[in-house]
Image (cartoon, grey):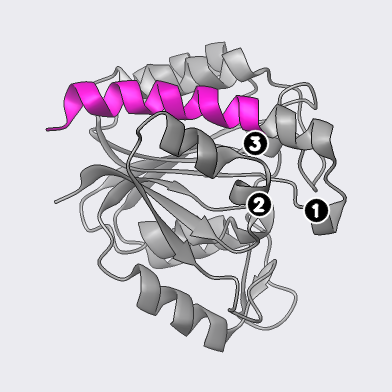
Amino acid sequence: MRNKGLLICDFSGVYEEEGFIKALRGDGIPFEVLDFKGVEGAQCYCDGEAEKKIRALTDGRKEVVRWIDSGDYHYMSLLFAESIEDPFTLVLLDNHPDDQAPEFGEILSCGGWVKELRKNSKALEGLLAVGPEGELKGPEDFKKAFAQVAPRRVYISLDKDVMGRDYARTDWSQGNLSLDEVKEIIREVLGSGAEILGIDICGELTESKGAKAEDYEINLRTNIELQKLISDYLNHCYV
């Protein structure tokens, strides 16, 4: 059974650096941190040994909401979603389709996890991709498509690089959605009555990738707003 707990997948220490951990504590939001900082071979491409270690730590986790660090680790959505047995629809908000073939054999990557999910998941019924490179460009496109599909179960995966730099600072090329537009899309899903199987969020910018105080401030502000939206839903719908 899933619960309304919050899981922090910590590969880089960025959530501590930008103040998100402190904000969660201050708001009284319960969370647990999984420390992946010592896992080698996990950034952008996740080699076999790193994948084994990550799977060992995430096996059996039931949290609905997972913050999964920078976009370099977006493949975490695959590791969580592939165990789903009931038919579901993936709602992907991302500036990139993440459906590229791996450059190095069959190694898991942040840019190819959607392709792998489509290939390996028998439960995945459909994909609604929102972003400049997706078939849906914004909230209105999404609402029409979502109403037509009317999925019973939904998995949300958000890379904040789908937003412009006023709302997110990432280490990948960014789109032009506003935070309000992203929240409108998420709110549409949460209010639909569909069962929410998971909500993953990535797109942080780390100090090693050049993050400055302003970048942390923007990302923290956006993270707090997104978490508030999600927490309000979970507190209303889960007991």
- Mark 1 crowd level (few <14, some 14–19, many ≥20, 10 Å Cα): some
Relative to 33, is 226 above or below?
Answer: above
Mark 1 or 3, nearer chain start? 3
- Mark 2 crowd level (few <14, some 14–19, many ≥20, 10 Å Cα): many
What residue is shown at x 50% (from left), y 67% (from top)? 35
Rendering coords of residue 86 (x, y %): 20, 51
User: Do labels 1 and 2 touch, CB within 8 Å?
Assistant: yes
Query: How far apart are labels 2 and 3 at the CA level?
Result: 15 Å
Q: Which residues are magenta?
A: 220-239
180 lies left or right of 152: right
Which residue lies under the disc numbered 2? 14
Asked whether residue 162 is in view, the answer is no
In depth, the one of 53 and 33 nearer the eye is 33
- Which amino acid is tagged 3? Lys
In depth, the one of 79 and 31 nearer the eye is 31
Rendering coords of residue 236 (x, y %): 21, 21
- Which amino acid is tagged 1? Glu
Rendering coords of residue 95 (x, y %): 70, 38
Secondary structure of the residue carrying tag 3 is: helix
171 lies left or right of 15: right
Asked if residue 224 is among those painted magenta in the image, a careful observer would answer yes
What residue is shown at x 70% (from left), y 44% (from top)? 96
Mark 2 or 3, nearer chain start? 2
| Occupied quadrant, residue 52 | bottom left
Query: How far apart are labels 1 and 3 at the CA level?
Result: 17 Å
116 lies left or right of 151: right
161 lies left or right of 81: right
User: Do labels 1 and 3 touch, CB within 8 Å?
Assistant: no
Query: Residue 160: which numbered mark, if any?
Result: 3
Query: How far apart are labels 1 and 2 at the CA level?
Result: 8 Å
Query: Residue 207: which numbered mark, if any?
Result: 1
- Which amino acid is tagged 2? Val
